[in-house]
C-alpha cells in the first residue's frame, strides 16, 4: 500500500515537471511573472490528481478481482 502511494507521488512529480515545462514559458510569453507559487501549485495539483486517479484505478481493479 505504501509503495503504491509512493509510486503515485513519483508519477505526480514527473507529470508536474512536464506541466511546469509547458506552463512557465507560456505564462512568461503572455506577460505573467511566474513566481515560485506557480511551481508549488503545479506540483501539489499534479501529485493530488495522480494519487486520486491511482486510488480509483486500484479500487476498480480490486472490485473486479473480487467478483
Image (tube, rainbow, N blue to C red):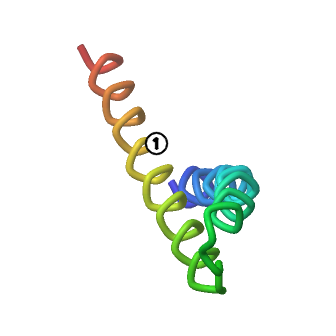
Residue at 32% in and 27% down: 60
Residue 12: which quarter of the image?
Answer: bottom right
The reply, left or right, for residue 10 in relation to residue 38 is right
Identified at 38% across, 25% down, the residue is 61
Q: Residue furthest bottom?
A: 36
**Displayed quadrant of residue 21:** bottom right
Above or below for 37 versus 7: below
Q: Which residue is mark 1?
A: 54
Residue 35 x %, y %: 65, 85
Please tell me which residue is depicted at 46% across the width and 53% down the height of the picture. 51
Above/below status of 13 relative to 64: below
- Answer left or right for 44 relative to 27: left
**Secondary structure of residue under mark 1:** helix
Q: Residue at x 63, y 64 (%)?
A: 27
Pick whichever, 35 or 60, lies toward us. Answer: 35
Give the x, y percent position of residue 49. Answer: 44, 53
- Can you say whether 44 is above or below 62 in the image? below
- Residue 3 in the image: state x and y as whole percent: 62, 55
Residue at the top extreme, as displayed:
67
Q: Residue furthest front?
A: 31
**Furthest residue to the left?**
67
Amino acid at each position: 500500500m505504501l509503495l503504491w502511494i509512493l509510486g503515485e507521488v513519483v508519477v505526480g512529480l514527473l507529470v508536474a515537471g512536464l506541466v511546469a515545462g509547458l506552463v512557465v514559458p507560456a505564462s512568461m510569453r503572455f506577460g505573467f511573472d511566474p513566481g515560485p507559487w506557480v511551481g508549488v501549485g503545479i506540483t501539489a495539483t499534479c501529485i493530488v490528481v495522480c494519487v486520486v486517479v491511482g486510488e480509483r484505478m486500484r479500487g476498480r481493479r480490486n472490485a473486479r478481482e473480487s467478483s
